[in-house]
Amino acid sequence: MSDLFDKILKLLGNLFLHAITFFVGMLLLIAPSMTISDIRAILLYEIPLSSCGAAVYALLGLCVYLMARVPYMRNMYSKVTILIPLLQMMIFTGLCMEFGKHFINRWADDAVYSKDTAVILMIVAIIVGRICMSVLYRMFPLSITMRDLIQSQRVARKNRGE
């Protein structure tokens, strides 16, 4: 009876974790396009929009980190190895766009910059973010990172006796 209960509990836990992963992944894939539409609306109507995107990206980044580090949650990432790099890139891209959106909001709200300067600062923020991401992935290539993750998971399984 206890063995059946453990299997059902493990199945429910897996379904819950996969649902969270799916939700975080979909949100990270959709969020940059939502930021682009916000930037477009700010430029078109010249009205600032509220922005809590950096906090949302930080929370989603924490979720991705925990899902990649906790061995029980890591199973899906070892099977679909492109997920972690894709989610990392979406987090970095979204943060860069949020910083660019901050410059556009400052123009629309306080007229700190001219419209042209705000757009240029937004583009520079996005380009600098992409350059930082390129440097990061040049220093820590994705293929090596994922290979190490899979290898560490295999070692952990061997140590547990699975």
Image (spheres, rainbow, N blue to C red):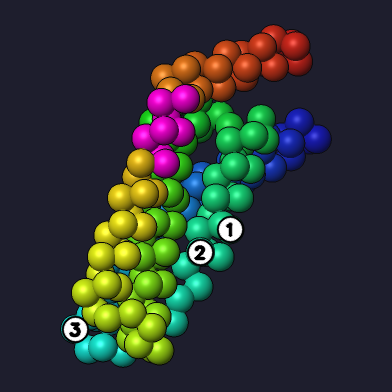
Say which amino acid is labelled 2: Ala
Residue drawn at point x = 39 percent, y = 49 percent: 129
Residue 2 forms part of the magenta stretch: no
Quadrant where the C terminus is found in the figure: top right
In the image shown, does 118 or 77 lie closer to the viewer?
A: 118
Position of residue 13 in the picture relative to residue 106 (left or right): right
Vertical position of residue 90 compared to residue 70: above or below: below
Q: Is residue 133 magenta?
A: yes
Amino acid marked by disc 1: Leu
Q: What's the magenta bit mostly, secondary-structure-wise?
A: helix
Quadrant of the rendered structure where residue 160 is? top right
Residue 85 lies, with reference to residue 162, above or below; the image says below
Query: Which is nearer the eye, 70 or 105?
Result: 105
Disc number placed over residue 44 in the picture, else none? 3
Provide residue 114's location: percent of width, then percent of height.
27, 81
Residue type highlighted by circle 3: Leu
The magenta segment is 132-139
Q: Which of the 4 image quarters holds residue 161?
A: top right
Query: What residue appears at the point 31 percent right and 50 percent down from the top-left corner?
Result: 127
On the image, the x and y values in percent for residue 67 come to 59, 41
* Crowd class of label 1 (few under 14; some 14 to 19; many from 20; radius 10 Å): few
- 2 or 1: tag closer to the N-terminus: 2
* Residue assigned mark 2: 54
Task: Name the residue beneath numbered marker 1.
Answer: 59
Q: Quadrant of residue 126?
A: bottom left
- CA gap between label 3 and label 1 equals 30 Å
Q: Which mark is residue 38?
A: none
